[in-house]
Image: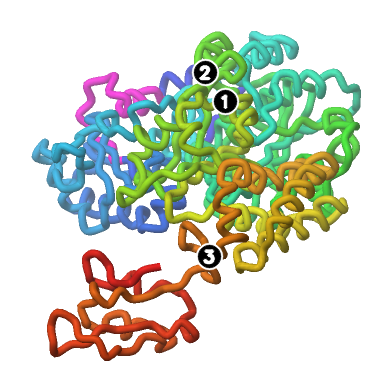
Amino acid sequence: MTTRLNSREDLLSLYGDLKHLADEKLEILHSKRKIISVCSCTGCASQDSLLIVEELNKHIQERHMEDTIEATITGCFGFCARGPIVKIYPDEIFYVQVKKEDAGRIIDAIVHDTVVEDLLYKLDHHDHAKHQNDIPFYGKQHRIALHKAGLINPESFEDCIATKGYQALAKALYEMSRDDVIEEVTRSGLRGRGGAGFPTGKKWSFAKASYADKKYIICNADEGDPGAFMDRSILEGDPHSVLEAMAVAGYAIGADEGEIYIRAEYPLAIKRLRIAIKEAEEYGCLGDHILGTDFSFHIYIRYGAGAFVCGEETALIHSIEGHRGEPTLKPPFPAVKGLNGKPTNVNNVETWANVPTIILDGADKFASIGTDKSKGTKVFALAGKVNNVGLVEVPMGTTLREIIYDIGGGIKNGRKFKAVQTGGPSGGCLTEKDLDTPIDYDNLVQRGSMMGSGGMIVLDEDDCAVDIARFYLEFTVEESCGKCTPCRIGNKRMLEILNRIVEGEGTLEDLDRLERLAETIKDSALCALGQTAPNPVLSTLHNFRDEYVAHVVDKKCPAGSCKKLVAFEIDKSLCLGCGMCARNCPVEAIKKSDQPVKNPRLMAYEIDTDKCVRCGSCLSVCPAKPKAIQK
């Protein structure tokens, strides 16, 4: 039966009772109990990590070892490229790419105090990394927003309390005035992690200063950037950190209600939020008279339908109200007139996840990390042509080179780095000259990109800069709400120009039109979606203008990825006469020629360029070294 916590002392007493759970995991006590934590977030769950937990527990039960070994779910370890991940506490043995069939071997290793060597991460020098901190991927990371992911069971309130959950809220309610809380967040230097980087404490102070009989707190969990999964992973791995932070902010600004606006495509995050809210209310950490005080705060979940524009705070508010998700001109800002016309504070998931640490450990500790104008850490979703795809949390000021090469393990297949797109559709491409740039809000903007919510997609030499710009612009055109003319019409005209260019029909005049349109849209669009939509176009024009010129003058795609500008041919002097290309051609465009190869019984092949659809199947299957199929 749940015991309601009616005071701060009740919370601390429960923390003391449950602290041994955290101690076992953190190896503070010399416990003989082993806890096997299995990543259960979306990436690993899609590779049957939940079945791994079931299989581990099956082996534990068969051996009657329930008192000494426990297998449980946990949040995202971040090393998504090597999932499913399994970590064993207190020894901190770290296994990668685990399968259900490995469960018995893992239990055997625990019983005999050994390790399953082939499940350990292999280092470059052929040794194995036994512990998480031995893996270069984690070497330069510093976890704050993600510090409990991989440690606690996100569906266990006891795990939350055992790792100091809701103690920041208790401290705020019992030791700090509303102004004290806002001052602490302001001194920390925390800026919004959702895109614009507005100072969080200042935003809270605006909402507090607005007089009204009702105020709201909103968590923006409408994560829509292609390739981004930071917020989803935080909610799947540690939902209580966000709930606690929203309650702290509610106390600070005088709000009694919070809304979590989350896209319906995040079913696991939604499930865990529901569990967390229910448990927090039962224990008295949310709801009426929190921890025995006169402060009440209720949190509700609101579902979005996946509209990218609803990441903009005014469009998000309209969606919650049941209206079409369209932005409105500011001012008035939501802090003055937001949800239902009342003062409203909106922050995104990652911003909220930093708040409990700031309140509990103090602003100075948080502010000691990062750069002068960008404090703390930032979570990035590292994706694209990089070896170690996953979630990365690093101090502000870490360079792109450190993230891509030291943490990300460099470019896949030994290819050459070309660019990295930061900030998603709102950001820009940064090139080799930017690799040693310390990452913070201001540095990225100065170089034609932006932090955004934290998407970071790495491109290699086979990616076409023009096609990348077209991809992002196509996304924003599709996601535009259509309310303002610059975004609705202007971006569509830019996309039409880019389509002409990649199809070999562009002109040099088109490049001038692109720039003029882009600058006009940036200056006149209603909201951040329209204002930043031209960024991928402008940054690629600036950094890769020669590629644009090659498309319109030479009618060639230097990267060989724009189909209409690529012609495949077979170098008969390299052809083996094996016929692999012909057998894999979907349109039968490859036939034997009358020229023999080194084996006189075989003939070289040739491509009928009129029939060829430029799919690249022939190139991918050609066994010749060097390849006989050439662009």
Seen at 53% across and 35% down, the residue is: 2
Asked if the residue under mark 1 is in contact with the one under mark 2, i.e. CB atoms within 8 Å, the reply is yes
Q: Nearer the viewer, mark 2 or mark 1?
A: 1
Relative to residue 106, is residue 19 depicted above or below? above
* Residue toward you, 492 or 317: 492
Name the residue furthest left: 112
Image x and y of residue 466, in percent: 58, 55
Q: Which residues are magenta?
A: 18-36
Count of number-bearing discs: 3
Please say whether residue 227 is visible from this viewpoint: yes
Q: CA distance from mark 3 to mark 1?
A: 34 Å
Classify the position of the C terminus by image quarter.
bottom left
Asked if the residue under mark 1 is in contact with the one under mark 3, i.e. CB atoms within 8 Å, the reply is no
Image x and y of residue 427, in percent: 63, 41
Q: Which residue is mark 3?
A: 562
Image x and y of residue 412, in percent: 34, 49
Seen at 63% across and 35% down, the residue is: 448
Query: What's the amino acid at mark 1?
Result: Asp
In the shown orientation, is residue 130 left or right of residue 629? left
Q: Which residue is mark 2?
A: 370
Q: Quick one: SS at disc 2?
A: loop
Q: CA distance from mark 2 to mark 1?
A: 8 Å
Q: Nearer the viewer, mark 3 or mark 1?
A: 3
Sequence order check: which comes first, mark 2 or mark 3?
2
Query: What's the amino acid at mark 2?
Result: Gly
Q: Which mark is residue 440?
A: 1
Sequence order check: which comes first, mark 3 or mark 1?
1
